[in-house]
Amino acid sequence: MPESYQASAALEKELRAALKGEVRFDNGSRALYATDASNYRMVPIGICLPLDQADVIAAINVANKYGAPILTRGAGTSLAGQCCNWAVVLDLSKYVNRIIDLDPTTKLARVEPGLVLDDLRDAAEKHHLTFGPDPATHKWCTLGGMIGNNSCGVHSIMSGRTSDNIQELKILTYDGVQLSVGPTTDALYDQIQTEDGPRAEIYRKLRELRDKYSEVIRTGFPKLPRRVSGFNLDELLPENGFNVARALVGTEGTCVTVLEATTKLIHSPPFRVLVALSFSDIFIAADNVPLIMSFGPVGLEGFDKHFMADVRRKNLHLADVALLPDGGGWLLVEFGGETQDEARAKAEKLLAHLKTLETPHDARIFLDPKTQRRIWRIRESGLPATASTGDDEENHEGWEDAAVPPEKLGAYLRDFRDLLGKYDYHSALYGHFGHGCVHTRLTFDLRSEAGIVKWRSFLFEAAALTVKYGGSLSGEHGDGQSRAELLPIMYGPELMNAFREFKSIWDPQNKMNPGKVIEPYRLDEHLRYGPGYAPWTPLTVFQYPEDRGSFVQATDRCVGAGLCRRSDGGTMCPSYMATHEERYTTRGRARLLFELMRGEVLKPDWKNEAVKESLDLCLACKGCKSECPVNVDIATYKAEFLSHYYEGRMRPRAAYAMGWIHQWSKIGSKMPGLANFFTQNAVTSPLLKFLGGISSERTIPKFADQTFRSWFFGRNKTQPRSLKVILWADTFNDNFHPEIARAACEVLEHCGVEVIVLKQKFCCGRPLYDWGMLDKAKALLQEILTGVGPYLEQEIPIVVLEPSCASVFRDELCNLYPNDPRAKKLSEQTYLLSEYLAKFIPPEKLPRLSGMAILHGHCHQKSIMKSDAEEQVLRAAGLDLETLDAGCCGMAGAFGFEKAHFEISKQIGELRLLPTLRSAKPETLTITDGFSCREQIEQFTDRKPLHLAEVLRRGIRP
Ligand SMILES: Cc1cc2nc3c(=O)[nH]c(=O)nc-3n(C[C@H](O)[C@H](O)[C@H](O)COP(=O)(O)OP(=O)(O)OC[C@H]3O[C@@H](n4cnc5c(N)ncnc54)[C@H](O)[C@@H]3O)c2cc1C
């Protein structure tokens, strides 16, 4: 039994000795890799992160010695359960990811399997080439995974499936045979047969298999562009060049391990024109697909009214949605050309033809690439729009990518709608309509016996329906476990035998990803939930109002899409971007917390070290809260976890030094000279840093000579005005940078606003969350609610200068006190300075500015408040503004000050933000509102970042 390997210390030991890379058999790592993006969960034996191809070979050699199964993994975004197994997992994404060669002349690239698709596309783009198939996960999925699944994408219309774009594969069998495989001419075959050894035997068996089954392969494989289910035995036919490489594409790691691939690159038309067509419903839209395809588009996607309703309900891209014509079913048709005119002419030809038809429709044409991107964003929001969160009825993958011949799409969809009605399942329909491939996330109940019986029955009927239309159970995601049991419906017994024989030629011991695709587990086995799912439900401090009050439901949110593994933009997830470690992704952390609540491989106990370790590098930037398609909120879960982890224990010294900054600053600001003497001189500063757990490389911020509050209360009283605000004197701007709060005061008064500062000193307690000091944080919030209560009643806005403080009021406060109306009011009445000015002050009243500026948004601002108001105000004031997409600065509150985090903090800053700023023109202003962002920038560059308030004040008094 595979479980017996779990205790195999000898296997682990030998792998450690054999590999240069990493070997992890601890429960935390096993829990981390227990699932992919599917409904399945199988805890692996252990994880290896091979350093190079030689390491992959060594790992499989050792596994073979112990008879341990193997599962090779890329980004783990598989949706059908093919990327979780009781096996030794080889994660190739971290190290085995080079482009070995890219030759624009032959239009071929040699790549390692862990390479991210977009890394290849970016390199190819320099030569106006591309790798054609582009799954929605193109920014983080790997070539190995694409080859495993035979992936496709929007532009498969132009390029075909992954298999159509593979020239040669270097592969390794479980028995250690290494081969380069591709098309096989008769001469090559004959030459191979002159050799002794395994290659000749494998090729002989493949030829025999092909000859034995050639008739049924020719007749039994449905003819449609998106046949992804089953093995590509048709590639072995003589008319297809006995292509062994392409026959192995789509075998989902069940036959061989791919060590290297030679991929074809294609010319990508540089100019695009997009047409959005709307019809009265999705069925009529689908009926028109074959006609539209005859006009030669390079992309043809569709979505229905339920999809649009989901997009609207989740407030996704509302401004973009308004660009689409009205209707009940939409098609996006992209045309390509060598010139804009060529692409446009193709689009106009289609539109002219459509006008001659009687089918009512509406059309818009988009020539500008930026607007085209906006329209594509709507289609790309498929998962965030349709995945269930919060109070939604739960939905799951499981029947999400069947494909039929495009000419039958309309009829198939009508029958499919009836089938959904029969089972009372609901879903939006969308997908790659040009290739007849339809996506759905359906409202399956995968938690009760009855729900699973119903689901199973539905799947068999859905498979029969697809086959009736000459379709493929999978049109792009693969069979894995969720379709494998259904394959006989599509292929019949003889072809199933052929598949079995094919697998056993490569993997006679059945050790490669066993139980998937061939000789499969039942589709209702090893479910992530299942009827037995009874998670631990401990009491929590946060109340999780958006997750029905349940921490368990919050940790269930992750659907495994893996967006948190992208490195090319956005904020999420800084620690992954710096480490390329699954355990430092949003997904990895959510999965570990899920496993903790599940309480099997990880014990249900808050004192878990693996979870703690994974959360330790979370910067609490809240990037995931807005960028993750299902809004996983690791910053909150981290604070929750740490609050329990440290129950009855001392926290690290940094927690008391920096978590209690509100206390220390009360003392320090009373005698700033003395405090600064101790924090800044060469003798006591290192000692204080040591005691406070602060990195010796960091400079401790200096107390100002006079606090903002002392300045404010010491000046002459201002005239009462009709517009009033409370200017929030936060700990940082009051004690360390009063010039910012003074500037804000001046700007607000310049705009005709009366500024009120509260007499009582409050602190929102932001740093306390970093160490889970939630009792104290709650107590501080209670003080604030009492103190500001009367002002809230008078509807006086609270203007907050520090984004991380504003985010406490907008975010954590309502999660801690969801039923306190004062909390709701405070959250609603809290404004950043920019938000207040944008909402209440006419642009002409703003101070006037000129020149160029760069805006770096604080992560909490980008996630919770968004930077739109800040951009609006700065532009209205006259600045020529560039807003950076430079991720997190790496400081993230106290994170980067901590000794243990200094290096990674610097590394994160150096990924994008710091080099961008260094290369900016000296006269360009750098604007950022976060205290920690400014510290990071000042400590690592020679730029002087300014708060919005300081910049605007320059427009009053240069
Ligand atoms: C939100 C979302 C959208 C998606 N959209 C699309 C889409 O538009 N089109 C599409 O085709 N798919 C799509 N997918 C599915 C998935 O992203 C793709 O199949 C992707 O190519 C898988 O890449 P990966 O690196 O994550 O592979 P993994 O999931 O890591 O692996 C996939 C399979 O390949 C095998 N494998 C990995 N490396 C090797 C190797 N070196 N040798 C042998 N076998 C190997 C694995 O064992 C596994 O069976 C989507 C998934 C999600 C979650």
Image (cartoon, grey):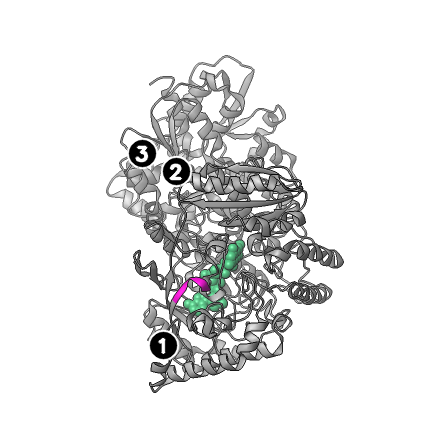
Q: Specify whether 819 is left or right of 616.
A: right
Residue ID at (28%, 38%): 919
Magenta-colored span: 163-167
Of mark 2 and mark 3, the one earlier in the sequence is 3
Residue ID at (74%, 59%): 423
Q: Label for residue 674?
A: 3
Q: Can you say whether 890 is above or below 424 in the image?
A: above
Q: Label for residue 178?
A: 1
Between 746 and 956, the residue placed more toward the observer is: 956
Between 138 and 13, the residue placed more toward the observer is: 138
Q: Nearer the viewer, mark 2 or mark 3?
A: 2
Of mark 1 and mark 3, the one earlier in the sequence is 1
The extreme right residue here reads 422
The local secondary structure at tag 3 comes to helix
Instruction: Count neighbours of disc 3 (C-alpha within 10 A) and say few if under 14, some if 14 to 19, many if 20 or more.
Output: few
The extreme bottom residue here reads 196
Residue 777, visible in the rendered structure: no
Q: Main secondary structure of the magenta part?
A: helix
Q: Amino acid at mark 2?
A: Leu
Q: Marks 1 and 3, Cα distance to the nearest angstrom?
A: 71 Å
The local secondary structure at tag 2 comes to loop
Q: Marks 2 and 1, Cα distance to the nearest angstrom?
A: 47 Å
Q: Position of residue 696 (x, y in %)?
A: 29, 47
Q: Specify whether 812 is left or right of 920.
A: right
